[in-house]
Amino acid sequence: MKLAKFRDIVDVNNLAELHEHLLSRDRGFYGSFWLWHDSGTELAVMINGDDSYVLFISSDRAAQHSTLDLMTNPNVPRTYIGSEGPSLYSSHSEDAENPDEEVDFLADNYEPTPMSKRYTVPLSQALIVMEEFFISGERSTNIRWYELSAGRLPQPPPKPWWQFWK
């Protein structure tokens, strides 16, 4: 399996190596990882302290536009997120204490990437998801997933009309 720590791509041969690489942090808090399974599926994880955002990409979507190709070949068109299809899944937390609060992450290009707390999971859960992904290449059943449609990044649901006057 290949793994990117931000833009540094390495080969990972076993769980011990995976665990070692997942300890990598920028500025002590931030982690950004892409995992490419041999089955063709992909997993992206951004970390800030104990908060994580997880994105699963099925093999049918990855076959169209592999993020590994996007990272290593400047000639690949940057249309990855914009394509149609029900094959992108974002982590989703219905239990978030402050779901509209944003958590700041760093993407693999070191760009600040704020995400709604409702789409984050605890780091401990994200680590389990990454281990399971390493073994199976499948989407974990240990977290809730939100299916992204038409390539749109997750947005908080609209407020009920009566909350606009608060």
Image (cartoon, helix red, strand yellow):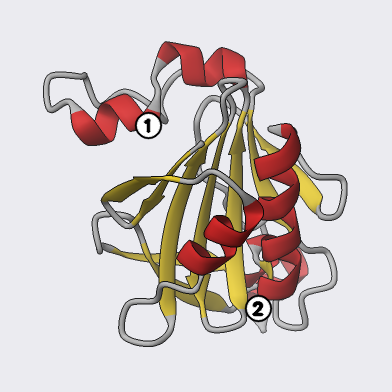
State which quadrant residue 146 falls in. top right
Q: Residue at x 57, y 31 (%)?
A: 37
Q: Which of the pair 112/32 is nearer the observer? A: 32
Q: Is residue 43 above or below residue 7?
A: above
Task: Tell me the mark number nearer the camera, choosing from 2 and 1.
Answer: 1
Q: Which residue is mark 2?
A: 165
Above or below, 69 against 131 in this view is: above
- Labels 2 & 1 near each other (Cβ < 8 A): no
Q: Is residue 50 left or right of residue 104?
A: right
- Residue 159 falls left or right of residue 40: right
Q: Say which residue appears at 17% left-offset and 25% top-offset.
A: 73
Identify the mark nearer the N-term, 2 or 1.
Answer: 1
Residue displayed at 66% across by 56% down: 158
Mark 1: few/some/many CA within 10 Å (<14, 14-19, 20+):
many
Q: Residues within 10 Å of mark 2 (few under 14, many from 20)?
A: few
Element type at mark 1: helix
| Depth check, front residue: 17 or 53 | 17
Q: Is residue 95 above or below residue 8?
A: below
Q: Which of the 4 quarters of the picture holds residue 5?
A: bottom left
Q: Position of residue 19 (x, y in %)?
A: 58, 65
Q: Nearer the viewer, residue 74 or 162?
A: 74
Percent across and percent down for residue 78 are 25, 27
Q: Residue at x 83, y 64 (%)?
A: 94
User: Residue most toward the left?
Assistant: 75
Q: Position of residue 76 (x, y in %)?
A: 20, 19
Please tell me the numbered disc located at residue 83: none
Indicate the quadrant containing the C terminus: top left, top right, bottom left or bottom right.
Answer: bottom right
Which residue is tagged 1? 67
Q: Amino acid at mark 2?
A: Trp
**Which type of secondary structure does the marked residue at label 2 adopt?**
helix
> In 3D space, how far apart are the residues under numbered discs 2 and 1 (Cα atoms)?
43 Å
- Amino acid on which disc 1 is placed: Thr
